Image (spheres, helix red, strand yellow):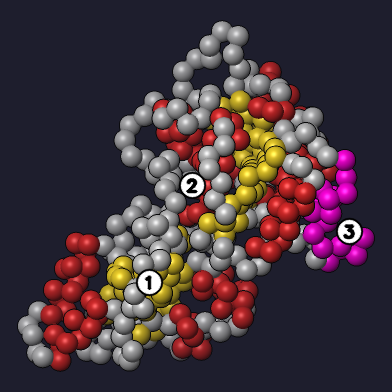
Amino acid sequence: MTAVRSPALRALIDGLRDGRPGAEEEFWHRARTDGTPLVEPDPQGDPAHRLVTFVWRDSPERPATDVLLLLHTVTDRDRHAGDLTPHLMRRVADTSLWALSHRLRADHRASYQFLPGHGSRAEILRTDRASWRGALDRAVPDPLCHSPALPSRDGRSPASVLALPGAPAQPYADAAGPVPRGTTLEREVGGRRITVHLPPGEVSPGASRAVAVLLDGEMWGPVLDAGGMLDRMAADGALPPTVALLVDTMGRRMDDLACSDEFVDWLADVLLPWAWREFGADPRPERTVVAGQSAGGLTAAFAAYRRPDRFGLALSQSGSFWWPDDDGDRGPEWLTRQYATGERRPVRLWLEVGAQEWMLLAENRRLRNVLRARGYDVRYREFNGGHDYACWRGGLADGLAGLLTGEPEERV
């Protein structure tokens, strides 16, 4: 193993070279105790960066021929470029240890997994879509990471989460103690599955509940437990009593979350009136937020543009504002141009995007600039991460709190 930058790995290698008994076990004991990945000072002495070393311990029964590190967005970017070799971990000779170091900004957050290979190197390095999906199906979390795992679905393993010291706090993302729990209901409205989360406690006489429509509800409900997050926010006074409507895509994501008039009108004219009748939800648009990520973020901003009479608040995370890229009639960044030229809507927007999202960053900045130029009330921030639920969990809580209770300080 050449060019070892990690002091902890160098100490291990020195101990092995000097024949110190138990050098490897001592390393693994420290890794189990302190947790992984190893986070050490920047080799260049920059306090704004850290050296992060990911480590994998081989199974003695079935040692790997290669191990691929899947660091969200960082690895994806090279996969899109057709070369995964920078993400092959290196084995420390005569040990069970595989390692790979990254120099990262000290505010980085990302989910990650490992893919041990037991065949040819060419197979594990395939970058076509089918092979990449297969890699994600087989990837596993870091067994030595102390941070709570990020759940997954469709039979995939959870992911581990790296959060460096300067990453924005996420106080509501994971359970930190018992709080009063609200009520979760499964309903069908107009042929669509809806998960409803009601806040704990009764509504005060004359009061009503705010409304949060969360797109990709099948992810935010049973997988990520957004209801628990909302309950923790409510217990801390960070969110007013809010009815959350988690809308399942039911296999129609590509149709519904592409600036679909029909879908947004269904949300506005069917789902919201149903929630008003059933749960005492506030019908005012200034108390109704629609939130989504990626194509859902695009749709949230579109819903506020198309139906400001229903959606006065929109929360877009990593919005796909490049859309569409294959429609000659509409042309790229269609929604941004609508906001630039259309009548100004009485809505407020919260936009955020990852600094690592090379395919979305410029488009989100352009929409921000258009909104500001048109006089919209918009809050915009960039987090140091990628297209990643590990980042979106905290951003969803911040955005809901900001839109429904006030505006925390803007981070750009």
Left or right: 141 as drawn, with respect to 152: left
Please tell me which residue lies in front, 183 or 334.
334
- Three-letter code, disc 1: Asp
Q: CA distance from mark 1 to mark 2?
A: 27 Å
Question: Depth-wise, is mark 1 or mark 2 nearer the camera?
Answer: 1
Number of other residues with Cα within 10 Å of mark 1, as a class: few under 14, some 14 to 19, many 20 or more: few
Q: Secondary structure at mark 2?
A: helix
First to last magenta residue range: 326-343
Q: Residue at x 46, y 38 (%)?
A: 229
Q: Which residue is mark 2?
A: 394
Q: Earlier in the sequence, mark 1 or mark 3?
A: 1
Which residue is labeled 1 in the image? Answer: 46
Residue 236 versus residue 41: which sits nearer the camera? 41
Identify the image quadrant of the N terminus: bottom left
Q: Residues within 10 Å of mark 3 (few under 14, many from 20)?
A: few
Measured from the top left, where is residue 167 in percent x and y? 43, 56
How many numbered dots are placed on residues in this image? 3
Instruction: Indicate which label's residue lies in the foreground, 1 or 3.
Output: 1
| Numbered tag placed on residue 330 in the rendering | 3
Q: Quadrant of the C terminus?
A: bottom right
The answer to whether residue 259 is above or below residue 290 is: below
